[in-house]
Image (cartoon, helix red, strand yellow):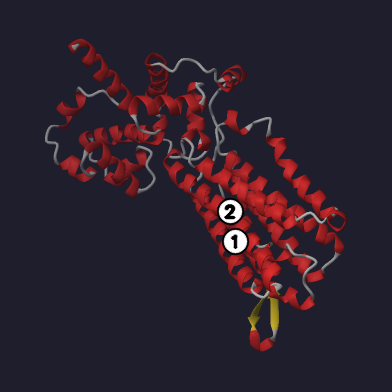
Amino acid sequence: MVFFVARHRDRRDKHQVTIASCQIVPSLMFEIPLPFVVALLLAILLVRLTLRGPAGPVGRSLRIFVAASLALVIMVGLRWQFDLLVFRFLRPLFAAMLPPIAWMCFAALGSEERSQTRWRWMHVIPVLAIFIASLTWRQWHIQVDFLIAVQFAGYGIALIVLASRGEDRFAQARLGDVGSVRSIVAVVGGALIFSGLVDGLIALDFSITQGTNVATIVGTAQLVVLVVLALLMVRLERHSPQTTKLNDSVTEAALSQQKDDPQGNNDIAEDDAILAAIDEVMHAQHLYRDPDLTLDRLARRVVIPARQISGAINRRFGRNVSQVVNEYRVAEAQMLLQTTDKPVTEIMFDCGFQTKSNFNREFGRVTGMGPRAYRDADPYPDERQSDQPFGPIRKLFSENAESREQG
């Protein structure tokens, strides 16, 4: 990250410190340390997230992550601007805290039973180890830079693995945006790995050329990594629910039952029972119309753990939860296209879609044609729609019943 140049605290003189500065107006010899420039950008992003960002745990995680990055950048700037002993000790601590914070921010997007794990305190261990190594550097000469680089690489790999997991790991993201959020997590993990590699490259350059190429390495790496992370945070802001507060009347007993999540036998009957519960809330409460619907909210409504919902839908449909929910939306869109004269855009919003591109893509996946072509191609709408079961789950049950009768 922006602290690459701040890692090698006792191997530079006053002249070398200037490699962390960015000459903004050469003719006036006016120099602003690059960490403070990046800090200004992060501060603007933090203000934007606070005033216009999403609410609930998703928004809170975003603000914590950006605030931690901002604190680290400011600490790096203070370290090289004043070179006080207190900043020498605090800089490695601030650096070591960022990877665990990044992990906990994205892990918090999972379902409630996954997010509230009792092992979260273990993330403090590497932070304390790095801080102790920094305090005792003159006595033991522990390679603090190497420890931080390994920590960044390890958390980066963990984030990439997290991004490859199922939808229940991102149950508090909008169902239609889970794919985008997973890609963001993967890129953030890659950025952390890149940060660790840059640290190693800087250490290698100091050991071989006494830091001759550090200015080029630092100037490129600082800007690339932090700008990418800032852009990713803005994108995640757009792909998160505007609120995760629930109006559901869920009792404490029901929530405790949800957290138990016993490892039962996941046979077809149990999967169908889960699907029936989902279908009930979809029909009775029209939950699919909520554009900010998340897997976590769906799990709370049916009082079934998100992991079981995701597993049952994947096994019975071979598709993910987002696609099945979109099929409910498409089913209502089909009905409205056949029975009303509403504009297509109005129907799109009424059914829970937010963007025309997503609506057209999902409608085409389900029906094989666009919404306007579907409306034009149906001369007898009432007769064709009246016999069809509404929604993918009831269609699945109907097909299974016909198969048993024919067998």
The disc at residue 193 is 2
Residue designated by label 1: 226
- Report the Cα–Cα distance between label 1 and label 2: 13 Å
Camera-nearest residue between 45 and 123: 123
Residue 369 drawn at (x, y percent): 20, 42
Question: Which amino acid, mark 1?
Answer: Leu
Q: Residue at x 27, y 40 (%)?
A: 365
Q: Is residue 84 above or below residue 308?
A: below
Indicate the quadrant containing the N terminus: top left, top right, bottom left or bottom right.
Answer: bottom right
Instruction: Please indicate whether residue 45 sits to the left or right of residue 133 in the image.
Output: left
Question: Which amino acid, mark 2?
Answer: Ile
Residue 319 drawn at (x, y percent): 35, 33
Rate crowding at label 1 as few (under 14), some (14 to 19) or many (20 or more) other CA atoms within 10 Å. many
Q: Residue at x 19, y 40 (%)?
A: 374
Indicate the quadrant containing the C terminus: top left, top right, bottom left or bottom right.
Answer: top left
Residue 333 drawn at (x, y percent): 28, 36
Residue 199 drawn at (x, y percent): 65, 60
Q: Which of marks 1 and 2 is in front?
A: 2
Q: Which residue lies furthest to the front in this view?
A: 208
Camera-nearest residue between 252 and 22: 22
Are the residues at dot 1 and dot 2 in contact (C-beta closer than 8 Å)? no
Q: Which residue is drawn at 75% across and 61% down?
A: 75
Can see residue 150? yes
Instruction: Please indicate whether residue 260 sits to the left or right of residue 121 in the image.
Output: left
